[in-house]
């Protein structure tokens, strides 16, 4: 297997790089990569939409009003997008992630860097996206990118940071170089599982806080929820073998604060709409974009039950979304639970 070290290439070197996914985040990352002078190809499945985005230099459905970089190539031809690329970013919702990677894998050169941008867990299994990349695309180098990163704020040029996680240090250095810009910083981590898990878990708590805001609750409540969410996330991480320390970084508490504090988050908005009385299906349809947390709640609840991990907020939101328990009943139960230690290492706190 040949593994090209592109991290040491001169800053001006132009690499062929593909981004799979035509939604908000794929588009935001494609714009960064193209802006850094790389030969950037974004793949989206719908040929008509690809042609329209290419012609109008705008992705009207997902990032209206945002000009696409003039060098960004957009295509619905997967082979044309990935051919000869040393780096492929995958921004496909978790439910379709495997299907797309499976299609792309035979078209990739050995040693291609495959980077997941997706924050979810595979439905009906407990696979994270890096597991899928390893299973479906053997012989590739794998990393995950996760952090407090609203696509809309990235394209608006707000100062932003994220984390690239991989056991492959050269891959991390390469991705740091490829994405770094005047407004975008990339930190590295070797805890792939922790970074990826943090990105998936925080979506659950964004639904919870969105709901609390819809119910008229104030900042005390939001702060209570975010802090106890972090405790739950770290307990779960410890139980499944991820490093709890990862959760105090950008991909953990950073993304948790962001997503639980803003209606730019689709997960937060799902919680908000359900809190206002909408049915879950109606809320998801109204958002019209992926809200990974809805599926993640089910999967994490099942895993927490199996492992005996105490996750009262996960149980609470699961009861509201999937068990038909009235919101006031769930809140009463949460608020009358045992008052334990604030900060503790024990998985039972
Ligand atoms: N939007 C953000 O701010 C943001 C930031 C960080 C991470 N993410 C993560 O990125 C992932 C993608 O999110 P997004 O915001 O781009 O979603 P989105 O809802 O904006 O777009 C999803 C895209 O995936 C495409 N898609 C769905 N199924 C497909 C299939 N079977 N084949 C090909 N394409 C398919 C859709 O056509 C659409 O273009 C999610 O896991 C999300 O959590 C999003
Ligand atoms: O819109 P959400 O809820 O999917 O959140 C987007 C990003 O994950 C924020 O980092």
Image (cartoon, grey):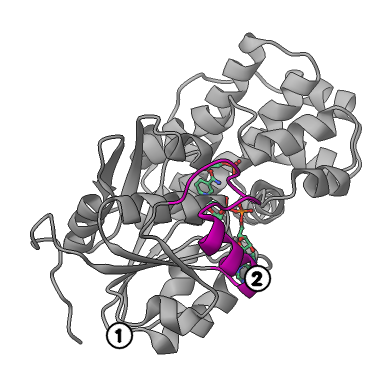
Which residue is depicted at the point 68% across and 10% down?
Answer: 218
Locate the N terminus by quadrant: bottom left
**Magenta-tinted stretch:** 44-68
The image quarter in which residue 80 lies: bottom left
CA separation in Å, label 2 and label 1: 28 Å
Location of residue 90 with respect to 274 vertically, above or below: below
**What percent of the width, then of the height, locates residue 62?**
62, 49
- Mark 2 lies on residue: 48
Location of residue 273 with respect to 225 vertically, above or below: below
Which residue is depicted at the point 31% across and 83% down?
Answer: 139
Location of residue 347 with respect to 34 vertically, above or below: above
The magenta stretch spans residue 120: no
Which residue is depicted at the point 55% across and 75% down?
Answer: 76
Q: Which mark is residue 109?
A: 1
**Residue 302 in sight here:** yes
In the displayed structure, does residue 158 sit left or right of residue 256?
left
Observer-nearest residue: 336 or 144?
144
**What percent of the width, then of the height, locates residue 344?**
45, 26
**What percent of the width, then of the height, locates residue 78?**
49, 80
In the displayed structure, does residue 8 sit left or right of residue 55?
left
Under circle 2, the secondary element is helix
Label count reads 2
Give neighbour class at mark 1: few <14, some 14-19, many 20+ (Cα, 10 Å).
some
């Amino acid at each position: 297997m040949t593994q090209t070290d592109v991290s040491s290439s001169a800053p001006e070197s132009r690499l062929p790089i593909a981004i799979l996914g035509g939604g908000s985040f794929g588009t935001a990352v494609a714009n960064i990569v193209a802006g850094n002078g790389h030969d950037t190809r974004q793949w989206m499945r719908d040929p008509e939409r690809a042609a329209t985005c290419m012609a109008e230099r705008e992705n009207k459905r997902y990032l209206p009003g945002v000009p696409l970089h003039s060098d960004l190539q957009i295509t619905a031809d997967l082979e044309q997008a990935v051919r000869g690329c040393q780096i492929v970013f995958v921004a496909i919702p978790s439910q379709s992630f495997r299907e797309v990677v499976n299609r792309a894998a035979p078209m990739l050169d050995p040693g291609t860097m495959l980077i997941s941008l997706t924050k979810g867990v595979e439905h009906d299994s407990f696979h994270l996206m890096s597991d899928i990349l390893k299973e479906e695309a053997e012989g590739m180098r794998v990393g995950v990118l996760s952090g407090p990163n609203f696509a809309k704020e990235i394209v608006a040029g707000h100062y932003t940071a994220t984390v690239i996680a991989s056991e492959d240090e050269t891959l991390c250095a390469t991705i740091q170089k490829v994405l770094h810009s005047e407004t975008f910083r990339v930190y590295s981590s070797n805890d792939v599982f922790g970074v990826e898990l943090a990105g998936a878990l925080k979506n659950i708590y964004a639904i919870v806080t969105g709901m609390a805001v819809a119910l008229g609750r104030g900042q005390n409540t939001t702060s209570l929820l975010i802090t106890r969410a972090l405790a739950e996330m770290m307990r779960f991480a410890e139980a499944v073998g991820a490093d709890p320390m990862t959760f105090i970084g950008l991909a953990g508490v950073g993304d948790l604060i962001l997503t639980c504090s803003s209606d730019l988050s689709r997960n937060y908005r799902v919680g908000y709409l359900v809190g206002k009385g909408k049915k879950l299906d109606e809320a998801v349809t109204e958002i019209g974009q992926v809200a990974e947390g809805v599926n993640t709640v089910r999967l994490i609840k099942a895993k927490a039950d199996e492992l005996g991990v105490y996750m009262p907020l996960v149980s609470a939101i699961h009861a509201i979304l999937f068990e038909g328990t009235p919101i006031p009943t769930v809140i009463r139960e949460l608020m009358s639970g045992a008052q334990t230690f604030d900060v503790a290492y024990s998985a039972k706190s």
